[in-house]
Image (cartoon, coloured by chain):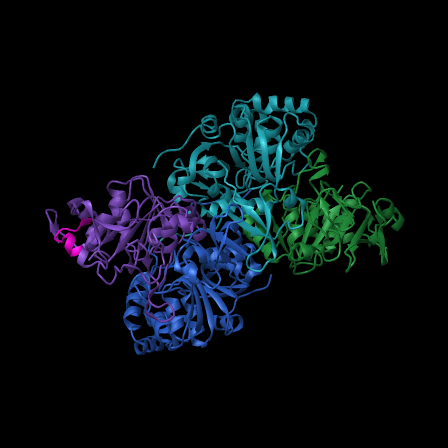
Chain colours: A purple, B green, C cyan, D blue
Amino acid sequence: MSTAAGEYTPQELMVVCAARQIRDGEVVFVGMRLPLIAFALAKRTHAPTAVGLFENGLVRDTPSPELLLTMGDAPNILGAEWATRTVALMGLLAQGCAQLGFVGGAEVDRFGNLNTSYVGRREHPTVKLPGSGGGADIASLAGRLAIIMAHDRKRFPERVSYVTSPGYGDGGDWRERVGLPRGGPAAVITTLAVLGFTDDTHEMELRSWHPGGSPEGVRAQTGWDLRVAADATETPAPTADELRIIRECDPQGFWTR
Amino acid sequence: MSTAAGEYTPQELMVVCAARQIRDGEVVFVGMRLPLIAFALAKRTHAPTAVGLFENGLVRDTPSPELLLTMGDAPNILGAEWATRTVALMGLLAQGCAQLGFVGGAEVDRFGNLNTSYVGRREHPTVKLPGSGGGADIASLAGRLAIIMAHDRKRFPERVSYVTSPGYGDGGDWRERVGLPRGGPAAVITTLAVLGFTDDTHEMELRSWHPGGSPEGVRAQTGWDLRVAADATETPAPTADELRIIRECDPQGFWTR
Amino acid sequence: MAEKVLSMAEAIRRYVPDGSSVALGLALEPLIPFAAGHELIRQQRRDLTLIGPISDILFDQLIGAGCVGRVKAAWVGNVSEGLGYNYRRATEQGIPRGLEVEDYSNYSVGLALLAAALGVPYIPMRSLLGSDIARDHPAIRPAPSPLDGTPTLLVPALQPDVAIVHVQRADAEGRAHVWGGLGVCEEAALAARGVIYTAEEIVPSEVILSDPNRVLAPEMKTLAVVHAPGGAHPSPVQGYYNRDHAAFAEYHERSRTAEDFAEWLREWVMGQPDRASYLAHLGDERWRSLRAREQRLAAPVDYGY
Amino acid sequence: MAEKVLSMAEAIRRYVPDGSSVALGLALEPLIPFAAGHELIRQQRRDLTLIGPISDILFDQLIGAGCVGRVKAAWVGNVSEGLGYNYRRATEQGIPRGLEVEDYSNYSVGLALLAAALGVPYIPMRSLLGSDIARDHPAIRPAPSPLDGTPTLLVPALQPDVAIVHVQRADAEGRAHVWGGLGVCEEAALAARGVIYTAEEIVPSEVILSDPNRVLAPEMKTLAVVHAPGGAHPSPVQGYYNRDHAAFAEYHERSRTAEDFAEWLREWVMGQPDRASYLAHLGDERWRSLRAREQRLAAPVDYGY
């Protein structure tokens, strides 16, 4: 894709969209891969006082000085403000201390439920995915959830076959009914679009399509009759500054090319 | 009191009796006051590989190099093999890792129940005692319990008015019935005697009276018709070696005079 | 990151209003925040709920000064000397006022704080089964384990409004290093809505961040950091000063009657505007005699890569 | 105190028989005891139950080598590369054998180990409510909280037979220092019936005892200490060496088919009698390039008095 700021990759745009989910001063449960860079980008732009939590037991108020392939890489530990036990860290999440959390997924459905476990029947899966990690905890307990996904019809079924990380179940007040204390997906950031959820039914809806795409293009890659928000628009392209910072964070393009 | 080894105080004899409860290799939940010295004495005589737990979060395999007035005194922390959180330490107790625990008490009854909370009615106590501390946990969860007490009729009622630390309840299989996972008092070491508990009814019985005393003297200071074990005998006096070590541990006699 | 350093008076005024539930004395016998407690007394705080395992004589002082409405603790007294006379007067005679007492044991109060720290409603335990602590406790309740039907006691989560934690060192941003026996410091700091640190030293952030495993809790929990050298006296601070055993004996003698205690309070608390003047009153020689004499440094640890 | 140092082969032979439940990979991505895992493979251990949050590719290797009957974990795969092919083959096709999978999340597996460490039967949580992890889990069960009737999930205590923990340093008596993100190392070490430490360095006891707050667990839990420099490669060890990202990519490529994996296994595990020969095979230059280049020492801490 290209912009006045120059060429960029879908991953770079997703990082920018993810960073924009982070508000200044928020406590953010940072996941793996793209959110690692989104957290660094947000810190260096509009959210300088955001704080990052990592499920291996880290809290950082500065982004790692080097690219991370895993959250347990040595540069993420040096300079952390707290290095502790996973349960102590996750306890903060369970208390409601994290306003925002990120997760990735292999499949997401109309109500934001995520599958990262079993494609096909649980007893005889056609694909066994790695599982929850901390994802299901973040989806259960964070104040808002941002989901990062590749976008195609196969990954966007109307109903996932297995709910690893609870979204809005079958919609409406489902989370409240099953006893989840808060939260739910606020955004799905994909290779094609940014999607949100309606306030009442909690059904996914298109909020913006990426430059070069279209609402119809997004709908064609979605496994149900996707609603389009009344004020849906094109995703603002990355700025030159945003791209510069992303490339400083990931000079080899390990996650963003 | 006096012996071939010379004069000694009731506290010194109690320390010796407490130390004798510790078997080599055991993990011992050490309480406050006399057991602090008993642990040091046992380590330096017959139980060199015993390990001590302290509820503030310490494990020591060497006794403190100096007299302790509290388990949190600095000399008890320096050289500890583990300094941790109380819940992590107490978790070992709850798992059943401690073969022996010590507690003190203000009142003990026929079935080894201890009161360290309320003399008189709970709502309007005549004496408000400090409470459990870790005592009730040790009494609930240690493999065997050794109780250290001053001995007089008032402190040995037939039934304590308040059970801070559970002994054998009303006897027999009471501990099993209320769900305590193990344990129960094995010894009551007093200023007058060492007492144990019968295997079946778990009633207290006199095992040995201290030199200069008599079974009748002990019974007279006990608030019920105290049984005397068939093989009850006089408490062996401290040896010269034991007294020397105690006095090295407590040169000012803070706890032992 | 914002600076959070306040004076003791300001930190207490701002973050510990009347009626607060306050966890303090969390490492058991060491690191007891006496300076903070004395400021609570000077500011005549009322209706506090005190939470802690064993706070040595600090709870007794706060109770005697009339600051306390309720105690949720495992032990209240004078560790090396025995009973707490103010605690006795309050519970036995309602002097200076009556006291609601919720008895815990050390493990159960630790589990109650841990449950709050973990964001879980309760923790089921087997300690205290059959005890009158469990029978009389207003919050702890018996329930068979749904797993196998065996008896347990459910210890509900206990969330203090504020935890006051005395530490060896903290930075201005609100991160603290603490070492020695930790008691329930971590559980209380994570459970509380917010934490006030009183610190022997305020150090540059680089010192704290050089050892993130030693940090007690993250900055998001911190309300204020107070520079309070000597702030735990007469309790000990590993690496800084030892327990002043004589002060506990002295307090024991001087708190036997309400009148004697009032005199003690005038001399050591009301008559001292702050900790500096308290230490001056203690006297240089006595204070020096308590200071650590020998350094015993931990082996170096390398966080490099 | 008894010496507990054993060779890797002897420690695994003595303390991890067929059918054991083994917790490993407990700090998530760092400090994964690959050397110990490879010894399990060489000794052809069978029917193991693997317990851990995320063990990066070590679980995949043990599964592919046929050592594993059951997995209780939050995530099995290749953290920087994606899926674990051996895990897929075992669960999708029963190659080399079928696998029972008990899915956890990181928090729930941590709470399960914590419950065992605390000696409590279970911990009730609100994470995973409404998820299929909870619906299908053989041990986790729903129950309303007896306190207020709201839904919770009860996570039963999980006690591994043995925890294998890779650490920076340990003493011969069985106490270890570990630093960095701790994951569930402490919970697993305290929960397990016994612990095997594999350590970059065996140091004098004075080093360990100089910093008792840094000790992971008491000696009473320790079964054996193994000197295993480089024993976590390709995972990182703070202060010692970095993650060998290339090795994870290489493994990803070379485990796509069962045949390729067999070849990889011959080269890196079966063909190497021990870790020294593994490191020699890795080559001096590559190993040197991973070693920590810059020291970043923690600020000194004084335990003196």
Instruction: Using the rendered image of the protein, determine whether residue D303 is visible from the camera's viewpoint.
Output: no
Position of D276 compared to A225: left or right? right
Q: In which quarter of the image is residue C98?
A: top right
From this view, report whether residue C284 is shown above or below residue B214. above
From this view, report whether residue D83 is shown above or below residue A232. below
**Spot occupied by residue D231 in the image (x, y as percentages of width and height):** 41, 65
Position of A75 compared to B117: left or right? left
Give the magenta-colored segment's residue range.
Answer: A207-218
**At 45% across and 26% down in the image, what residue appears?**
C10
**Spot occupied by residue D59 in the image (x, y as percentages of width and height):** 39, 67
Is-magenta flag for residue C201? no
Q: Nearer the viewer, residue B37 or C225?
A: C225
Q: Which of C281 and D104 is in front in this view?
A: D104
Instruction: Using the rendered image of the protein, determine whether residue D178 is visible from the camera's viewpoint.
Output: yes
Q: Residue furthest left?
A: A4
From this view, report whether residue C61 is shown above or below residue A30. above
**Spot occupied by residue D30 in the image (x, y as percentages of width and height):** 38, 59
Q: How many labels does the image show?
A: 0
Q: Quadrant of residue A97?
A: top left
Q: Which of C198 and B109 is in front in this view?
A: B109
**Spot occupied by residue B87 in the image (x, y as percentages of width and height):** 55, 49
Quadrant holding the C terminus of chain B:
top right
